[in-house]
Amino acid sequence: MTSTPTPALVPETEQPHGTLGLGQGTALYIASVLGTGILVLPGLAAEAAGPASIVAVAAVLVLSIPLAGTFAALAARYPDAGGVASYVRRALGNTAARMAGYWFYFGVCIGAPVLAVLGGEYVVAVLGVDRSAVPIIGLAVFVPPFVANWFGVRVAGWVQFVLTGLLIAVVVGVVAVTFPAADAANFQPFLPHGWAGVGVAISLFVWAFAGWEVGTHIAGEFKNPRRTIPIATAIAVVVVGIGYLALQFVTVAVLGDRAGDGQVPLLDLVETTAPGIGPVLVAIIAAIVTVGVMNAYLPAFGKLGAALGRDGDLPRFLAKGAADGEVPRRALALTGVLILAYYGLMLLNDLDLTGFILIHTSNMVAIYAAGMLAATLLLRTWSFGWWLAVVATIMTVALLVLAWSNLLVPALLALAAVAVTVVRRARDRRAGRASESSTETATDHLTIPEEQPA
């Protein structure tokens, strides 16, 4: 009987080194987490919990450390283009790995057009352009990241380094410009909606701190994964945490009860102290965020698609580009087709993104749960990384329970993965029977000579 071999994860010391340095890698991590959340979440969290929303941001930052640390430990030790799917394959088998791969490639991918539309909506609102321009602006967001990644992760890494630098600069600029308008009176009462409001704010910011898994797919592109990835992750945790905490502070301190009232809370914030340059600054932020996050995720989708082709979970035609240093152009092209298809569905749905966002987030939770469970089996028992994985597993299982009502798409993708397994096993059985039949036929035609008398 024939079967598809399970690709072994090779430790970092046996892997060829890539081209990404600490600066580029850190930029990719920061952009994948400090994304479009800065455009809307500070206002929404302040509306839900008031000044106590700062506590919610701090709590989620602390809770995200085990998740980020676990992914860093896995990526540093087992750099592979399959990312979480590769870890799950090693720990839980081919079918579970196929589920994780499908969840990210087909489920999380739906977040790419959501990102573009969010950026388009913000730019339109800020510049006062007719809303009919949103689809055009959204499509324009795709072009630079696709072009950069078509020439390889080295080019995309330098592009991301510049974009993330600009993003950090404008976040610092917003905080610096608005801080003089802070009013201590806006911190009273501190808990206007009780601890229940803090819980709502925490649930909002859980999604803001997602994205740590992106680096696992391009771990093999780092010059020294075992050293660079943990450092890049640690720097990104600090930068993202400070960024969100600072934005949440000035949102509460400057806007007070008005936080979350408008569709573009970041614009309301900067217009308080910079009415002339505010709209331009926010439009720049929106453009940098959307292009930067897209540029961070596209290499992950491309490498994962190629790895799924390599491992037989997608057509092997897509496998080209899975190896470190190669450009997965075929998988990137398929990713582009998927994004355009999802984009078309959003247009048919009048750009109502709620359902698409829920699909994206529910698939993320499913991937996190599978990845953290695999980590507890792969990392050395009782090590620091193992304890991080245990804590993160408990956290992600709790998130999975909270998201149970939105798990239809992940369940359908899991069924598709099981169906592939069933078809593959049936095919292997038929191939085995055919091989046995051929052997028997060949044996029947053999002429056994009679024993000759002595």
Image: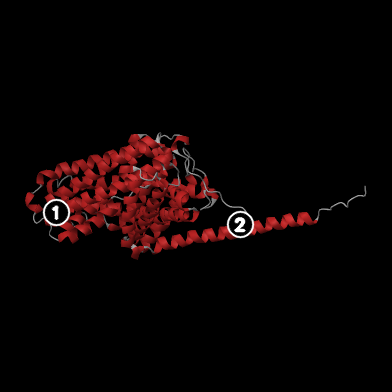
Check disc 1 and give the amino acid type: Pro
Mark 2, Cα crowd under 10 Å, few <14 / some 14-19 / many 20+, is some
Q: Report which residue position mark 1 lands on.
A: 51
Callout in the foreground (2, 1): 2
Res 192 seen here: yes
* Residue with the most extreme right position: 453
Tell me the SS state at disc 1: helix
Displayed quadrant of residue 75:
top left
The residue lying at 24 percent from left, 45 percent from top is: 241
Pinpoint residue 378: horizontal percent, then vertical percent: 42, 46
Q: Report which residue position mark 2 lands on.
A: 428
Q: Marks 2 and 1: CB-CB under 8 Å?
A: no
Which disc number belongs to residue 442?
none
The residue lying at 33 percent from left, 44 percent from top is: 69
* 98 with respect to 424 (left or right): left
Task: Point out the tag, 2 or 1, that comes first from the N-terminus.
Answer: 1
* Residue with the most extreme front position: 454
Nearest the viewer among 49 and 333 is 49
Nearest the viewer among 10 and 361 is 10
Pinpoint residue 132: horizontal percent, then vertical percent: 30, 58
The residue lying at 39 percent from left, 37 percent from top is: 226
Res 295 seen here: no
Tell me the SS state at disc 2: helix
